[in-house]
């Protein structure tokens, strides 16, 4: 099945709150798909909703210049930090923040900067993100995700990489820190703005000393100017970037604590799900991201259906990660673990 066909198995949704989806029969689903990461702070973050309502009341829907463009630049630059573009010849760090209407516009801008058509963006939670570099150091080729890359001794350097929240800083070990160490020339931040209609934010290495992607390819150009988009969308993206910085989980802790503890019934003790201790051969966990590795136990199509029947929405894309929710009950966590154990032991139903 395709991702759309898997998602079509979900009944029509009446409303979405935090990390839960509710259908018209009142059944609740714990959302581990989270709109591809765009709902990693929930489907209706309070501060984001308030910001959008305020800007909407000002009537700023048309594509007009506004103060929210510079504000978005500052918020994203602070969020990404210096490691955006660490592969400068002189060791300097920095990034130029742009935004473009749709994936095609962003892809054209990236191609102009790289001097070549970019491949698929590298995902830092993919196993290849923490893997060894190719033996032929210095040769240019395609990375595991299909993007242009330039390899050097002991490192992989994808030309274009996603930037995912809550994976730790540049000193993090393994794949968790790969998005920083990879020194991608272009980063695509996955911001918590639910919905794919928002413009694509792109962070380019900001220096005149950018090296060409590969031998024989023209030197990189300066990034094209941002598209003129609705101030309403820019204000929402700025709020989303600020919300990520203010979230208590932004430190990339190995465990995935909830923002609010769950009271254990009949006891004065507090009990929260410990996703760090959820060991299963079905998943490879990188921070809050879960990559499906249980194909031998159960094909992903059947696993997606099984989890959905149990009230859990996994990522509809097989290669994209499911995401541990920022909040859920201990009972839901226990049901998730129990289903994993059932699949491990019994496989197909």
Image (spheres, rainbow, N blue to C red):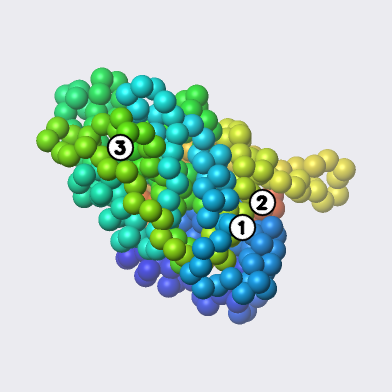
Above or below 188: residue 17 = below
Disc sitting over residue 158 in the figure: 3
Who comes first in sequence, dot 1 or dot 3? 1
Between marks 2 and 3, how big is the CA–CA gap?
33 Å
- Tell me what residue is drawn at x 34 percent, y 47 percent: 223
Dot 3: element:
loop
Q: Which residue is mark 1?
A: 42
Q: Position of residue 46 (x, y in %)?
A: 70, 60
Above or below 125: residue 201 = below
Estimate how packed mark 2 is, as few (under 14), some (14 to 19) or many (20 or more) residues with alpha carbons within 10 Å: many
Estimate how packed mark 1 is, as few (under 14), some (14 to 19) or many (20 or more) residues with alpha carbons within 10 Å: many
Residue 191 in view of the camera: yes
Circle 1/circle 2 CB separation < 8 Å: yes
Nearer the camera: disc 2 or disc 3: 3
Q: Position of residue 342 (x, y in %)?
A: 50, 50
Who comes first in sequence, dot 1 or dot 2? 1
Circle 1/circle 3 CB separation < 8 Å: no
Q: Nearer the viewer, residue 226 or 86?
A: 226
Q: Which residue is mark 2?
A: 327
Between marks 1 and 3, how big is the CA–CA gap?
30 Å
Dot 2: element:
loop
Q: Position of residue 228 (x, y in %)?
A: 44, 63
């Amino acid at each position: 099945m395709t991702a759309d066909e898997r998602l079509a198995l979900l009944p029509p949704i009446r409303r979405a709150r935090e990390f839960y989806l509710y259908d018209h029969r009142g059944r609740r689903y714990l959302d581990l798909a989270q709109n591809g990461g765009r709902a990693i702070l929930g489907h209706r973050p309070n501060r984001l909703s308030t910001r959008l309502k305020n800007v909407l009341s000002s009537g700023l829907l048309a594509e007009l210049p506004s103060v929210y463009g510079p504000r978005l630049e500052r918020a994203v630059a602070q969020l990404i930090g210096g490691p955006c573009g660490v592969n400068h010849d002189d060791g300097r760090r920095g990034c130029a923040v742009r935004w473009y209407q749709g994936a095609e516009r962003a892809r054209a801008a990236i191609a102009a900067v790289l001097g070549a058509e970019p491949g698929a963006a590298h995902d830092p939670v993919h196993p290849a993100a923490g893997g060894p570099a190719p033996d032929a150091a210095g040769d240019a080729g395609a990375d595991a995700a299909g993007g242009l890359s330039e390899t050097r001794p002991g490192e992989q350097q994808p030309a274009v990489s996603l930037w995912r929240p809550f994976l730790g800083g540049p000193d993090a070990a393994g794949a968790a820190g790969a998005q920083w160490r990879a020194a991608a020339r272009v980063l695509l931040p996955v911001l918590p703005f639910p919905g794919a209609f928002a413009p694509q934010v792109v962070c380019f290495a900001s220096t005149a000393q950018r090296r060409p992607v590969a031998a024989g390819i023209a030197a990189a150009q300066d990034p094209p100017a941002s598209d003129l988009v609705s101030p309403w969308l820019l204000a929402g993206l700025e709020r989303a970037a600020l919300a990520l910085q203010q979230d208590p989980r932004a430190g990339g802790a190995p465990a995935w604590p909830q923002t609010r503890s769950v009271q254990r019934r009949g006891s004065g003790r507090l009990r929260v799900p410990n996703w760090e201790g959820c060991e299963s051969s079905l998943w490879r966990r990188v921070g809050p991201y879960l990559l499906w590795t249980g194909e031998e136990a159960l094909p992903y199509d059947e696993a997606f259906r099984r989890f959905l029947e149990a009230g859990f929405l996994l990522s509809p894309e097989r290669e994209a990660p499911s995401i541990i929710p920022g909040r859920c009950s201990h009972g839901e966590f226990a049901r998730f673990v129990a289903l994993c154990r059932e699949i491990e032991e019994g496989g197909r139903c």
